[in-house]
């Protein structure tokens, strides 16, 4: 079967850092660690495992960050390589183990976070995160597991797609544990179902950030899939107040409005006016950026994670405001944290998904996201701007990595 693999090495890291801005060849091309290969299908490791043919698989901003070696190396011990990439997966069941509890022919989405049950640990040996249902922070991600796949011990790794033992969705087929699979209703088309994973990322953050003042505005920074998903998740879970989306490009603004944004502002003067409109007054220090007092946003979702957006969030937050970090912030130089203490701000990050409390029930984020998609009928399929066959993966990565040039939002691969 065809699959896209990625391997890391010091020479590739140095190439990407030295000439990656000049040529994409060292990031996604012939000189990179990205390869389209033929691989033998893996056997099912046990009766609770399932084989899927991949219908669609997404390219994530995290993938671009890792392939370009711009992400922090801090998470490197919690992956294993070489790996078949792809953690946003829509598939169809083609083979089931005796205890798989799904049926051949079903469409399913895949929770790619690798938890203690997938690793093969008895429930009594699960880590604290997995016991609590918050498996995206599994505390055994840096260790081998008891599960044997193709005669080899289960390798370390946090997420399918960056895992030597558990190939991801940039391939014609994958295997997955039954606990990772969530059936898709016929009411949802393939493109909608294919963005379930990034929608669930946003849903997890929204469900765990209760709205304390329904009349106060919320600001969402970013124009990528996670930011747009956050706007949808706020509306889908019942928030009726003002949502100000900071969006760069017209086509992204159109999607943001369709998903529930009240107002759209561009970074710079328009964003400045948005905070002034909350009642804030501007002050200019002797050196540095403009700062504000009075007004401000009590809740800000930073779905970018850059120095610029984090600095803006800290300055735009009201006293005792909350900053939710959904962008994959990494090593950031010269970030001024003054307002964390001067305004008594609460800063919290989120990753993945898990068991959530919603409408009086305890359910997985994927289930909640799925049902709200059916309930709202929101046009989330508009997030998908490009679809490429697997053999054109390098072009697909180029399009996903240069959103300004290609007007891309979510790019999918279709094996």
Image (cartoon, helix red, strand yellow):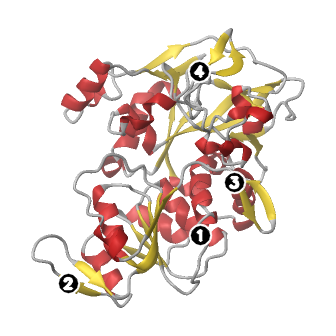
Whole-number angstrom distance, CA of label 2 to CA of label 3: 42 Å
Secondary element at tag 4? loop
x and y percentages locating residue 127 in the rendered image: 68, 38
Q: What element carries label 2?
A: strand
In which quadrant of the rendered view does residue 149 lie? top right
Residue designated by label 3 = 365
> Mark 3 or mark 2, which is nearer the start of the sequence?
2
Q: Which residue is drawn at 77% across and 27% down?
A: 50
Circle on res. 234 = 1
Mark 4 surroundings within 10 Å by alpha-carbon count, few (fewer than 14), some (14 through 19), many (20 or more): many
Q: Tell me the tag on residue 283.
A: 2
> Quick one: quadrant of the N terminus?
top right
Q: Is residue 163 above or below residue 256?
A: above
User: Mark 4 vs mark 1: which is more N-terminal?
Assistant: 4
Left or right of 341: which side holds 348? right
Mark 1 crowdedness (10 Å alpha carbons): few <14, some 14-19, many ≥20: many
Residue with the mark numbered 4? 155
Residue most extreme to the left: 286
């Amino acid at each position: 079967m065809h699959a896209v693999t990625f391997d890391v090495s010091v020479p590739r890291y140095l190439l990407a850092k030295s000439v990656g801005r000049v040529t994409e060849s060292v990031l996604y091309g012939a000189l990179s660690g990205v390869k389209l290969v033929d691989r033998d299908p893996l056997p099912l490791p046990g009766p609770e495992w399932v084989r899927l043919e991949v219908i669609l698989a997404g390219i994530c901003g995290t993938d671009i960050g890792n392939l370009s070696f711009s992400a922090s190396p801090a998470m490197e011990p919690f992956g294993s390589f070489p790996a078949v990439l792809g953690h946003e997966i829509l598939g169809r069941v083609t083979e089931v183990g005796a205890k798989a509890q799904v049926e051949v022919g079903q469409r399913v989405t895949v929770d790619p976070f690798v938890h203690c049950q997938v690793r093969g640990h008895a429930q009594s040996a699960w880590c604290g995160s997995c016991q609590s249902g918050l498996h995206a922070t599994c505390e055994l991600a840096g260790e081998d597991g008891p599960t044997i796949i193709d005669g080899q011990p289960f390798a370390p790794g946090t997420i399918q797609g960056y895992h030597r033992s558990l190939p991801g969705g940039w391939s014609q087929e994958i295997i997955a544990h039954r606990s990772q699979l969530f059936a898709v209703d016929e009411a949802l088309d393939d493109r909608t179902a294919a963005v379930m994973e990034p929608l669930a990322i946003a849903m997890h953050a929204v469900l765990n950030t209760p709205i304390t003042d329904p009349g106060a505005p919320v600001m969402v920074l970013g124009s990528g899939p996670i930011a747009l998903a956050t706007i949808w998740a706020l509306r889908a879970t019942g928030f009726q107040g003002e949502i100000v989306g900071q969006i760069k490009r017209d086509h992204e603004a159109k999607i943001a409005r369709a998903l529930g944004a009240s107002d759209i502002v561009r970074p710079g003067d328009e964003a400045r006016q948005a905070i002034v409109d909350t009642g804030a007054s501007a002050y200019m220090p002797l050196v540095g950026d403009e700062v504000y007092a009075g007004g401000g946003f009590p809740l800000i979702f930073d779905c970018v994670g850059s120095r610029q957006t984090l600095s803006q969030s800290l300055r735009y937050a009201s006293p005792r405001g909350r900053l939710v970090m959904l962008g994959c912030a990494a090593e950031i130089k010269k970030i001024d944290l003054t307002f964390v203490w001067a305004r008594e701000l609460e800063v919290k990050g989120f990753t993945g998904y898990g068991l959530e409390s919603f409408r009086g029930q305890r359910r997985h984020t994927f289930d909640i996201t799925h049902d709200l998609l059916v309930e709202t009928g929101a046009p989330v399929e508009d997030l998908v701007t490009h679809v490429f066959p697997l053999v054109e993966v390098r072009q697909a990565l180029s399009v996903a990595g240069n959103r300004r040039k290609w007007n891309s939002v979510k790019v999918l691969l279709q094996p």
